[in-house]
Amino acid sequence: MTALIVAEHDNDSLRPVTGVVAAAATAIGGGYDVLVAGEGCAAAAVEAAALAGAGKALLADHAAYGHQLAENIAPLVAEVGGGYSHILAAHTTTGKNFLPRVAALLDVAQISDIMAVVDEATFKRPIYAGNAIATVRSSDAIKVVSVRGTAYDPVPAEGGSGIVETFDNIHDAGLSGFVGESLAVSERPELTAAGTIISGGRGMGSGENFALLDGIADKLGAAIGASRAAVDAGFVPNDMQVGQTGKIVAPELYIAVGISGAIQHLAGMKDSKVIAAINKDEDAPIFQVADYGLVADLFKALPELEALL
Amino acid sequence: MKVLVPVKRVVDANVKVRVKPDNTGVDLSNVKMAVNPFCEIAIEEAVRLREAGVATEVVAVAVGGSACQEQLRTCLALGADRAVLVETDEPVHPLGVAKALKALQDSEQADIVLFGKQSIDGDNSQTGPMFAALTGLPQATFASEVKPQDGSLEVTREVDGGLQTISVKLPAVITTDLRLNEPRYASLPNIMKAKRKPMDKTTPAELGVDVASSVEVLSVERPAERAAGIKVESVEELVDKLKNEAKVIA
Ligand SMILES: Cc1cc2nc3c(=O)[nH]c(=O)nc-3n(C[C@H](O)[C@H](O)[C@H](O)COP(=O)(O)OP(=O)(O)OC[C@H]3O[C@@H](n4cnc5c(N)ncnc54)[C@H](O)[C@@H]3O)c2cc1C
């Protein structure tokens, strides 16, 4: 029994979530190898082979894989993964894009967004926006599983075999092409990896007002997130959305500002260690999950908070 | 150009579901059901493509129990031209649905198949890409903008890092994200008209597919509850608690 992990990376380096997936593989038991498919991604493969517990890293380096297009990545993963007991990837927009395609090519089910490994065939996963937790068992010969980014602490970056093998079979379906991207550039930590997050909702009133969170985020070394309403209103970009259908986060401290606490938002942040909320409505549902609630006008409270930190 | 829109019947997004006391599932008796919100966005996009003269026919399809007819009627009221129900009493799961839809696509030969990115009950986020794999079609998931080109679609996708634009050759699979459009409401005349629109029925057996699942649900439990917190009186008190009690800020 050995698992194949499909690494998440930006061609230069591994994303931290790959270490989380490696921790899930470790919990399954039986060791794991890591497939690193991309373009000019040899350095990421070296990092993958170094992960604690890693068998070998398989490097598939070709222009066809450069942008993780599912039509090209999925047949590669299905080909390489056919010899493994498990195929694991992160439940990120990258993993969610290619992994179901892999499962269908192998004619097996996928188990999405697992929060815990019970045994090699049994997993716990949230359903209904996290309002219920299902324990499910797969009878498939190959278990295809996507792992929630907050499920485990990442394995240490060192201790692996250091072996990198190259894989030369190229799959280029020629059905899709990369046109362009506009990626958020920020000096702040990534939302899904941040120890502290301060998020704004519709109550912020405008995109400009999100600047009220900047000084606080600077002082706390925090990432800035948002509710769907704030993204839909155009205050901030989509990559900041926390929730059932956005990003799942579980920082040490989550501060919700002008967010009512709809179930879809809670689904993305209620596993945070400590939750603080600032809302002018004392009956806002966010206070039912907040460890510390402050009933106040955010336009008054935020400058005070910044000054006190 | 034909657009096929698979839709799922799910618990309404505003319902807070309860786990059954015997831990076999969630209690769906007397709960309001609806078209999965992402599928509603897919119907809206398909109808807009027809209104823009790009598409000529919009076909809504559901795989599930006979009650799904209610949601298919809603889709017809929202502008779909006809509907197909693939009727089964088996619990539906992504691979089985993808197989049934593949069999249907073999005869429908749609140019665009527009899925929701996930259903808000199972939260699997699988069916669209699985269908794309089975049919060998390209996919553009989490779409926030779809621009038809000659023989292809240019699609902007909401990804974790921001936005990505890709081009996919037709026929193609799209899955919708929240910002693709804002679905309309069905007007009363359109609800009346929908009653007369055609709805075909078939079954997985007639389509020659096996929709049984290889995944067994052993139990369904309530998530761990958070202990009730406290209200603080001032920003000073909040900072003090975070520093000295929770010890989450320095
Ligand atoms: C299919 C689907 C998927 C969804 N996915 C997500 C998701 O992933 N993430 C998500 O967040 N939501 C999601 N939602 C939306 C969710 O249901 C809520 O609509 C949304 O979270 C509300 O955002 P909000 O709390 O910012 O806005 P509102 O609910 O409007 O709340 C604004 C809050 O701000 C407070 N406020 C206003 N002014 C001030 C002030 N001056 N000072 C202090 N407080 C103030 C108000 O009291 C209120 O509580 C989804 C919904 C659906 C149907």
Image: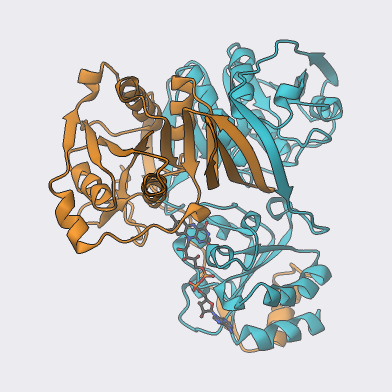
Chain colours: A cyan, B orange
Give whichever of A153, B170 is nearer the camera. B170
- In this rendering, the answer to whether B106 lies above or below B79 is above
Q: Quadrant of residue A79?
A: top right
Up/down of A133 relative to A77, above or below: below
Label tally:
0
Residue A171 at x, y percent in the picture = 65, 15
Q: Which of B219 and A246 lies nearest the eye of the viewer?
A: A246
Residue A120 seen in render: no
The front one of B166 and A306 is B166
In percent of width and height, residue A210 lies at 69, 73
Left/right of residue B149 with respect to residue B35 in the rendered view:
right
Location of residue A187 (image quadrant):
bottom right
| Residue under the image location 46 percent in, 52 percent down | A130
Relative placement, left or right, of B176 versus A231 is left
Q: Quadrant of the C terminus of chain B?
A: bottom right
Q: Residue at x 38, y 23 (%)?
A: B214
**Residue A10, visible in the rendered structure:** yes
* Residue A20, image x, y percentages: 68, 39
User: Residue at the location (26% across, 16% down)?
Assistant: B208
Q: Is residue B213 left or right of residue B128?
A: left
Dividing the picture into quarters, in which one does residue A292 lie? bottom right
Q: Residue at x 52, y 18 (%)?
A: A142
Quadrant in the picture for the N terminus of chain B: top left
Vertical side of B151 occupied by A278: above or below: below
- On the image, the x and y values in percent for residue B129 come to 49, 31
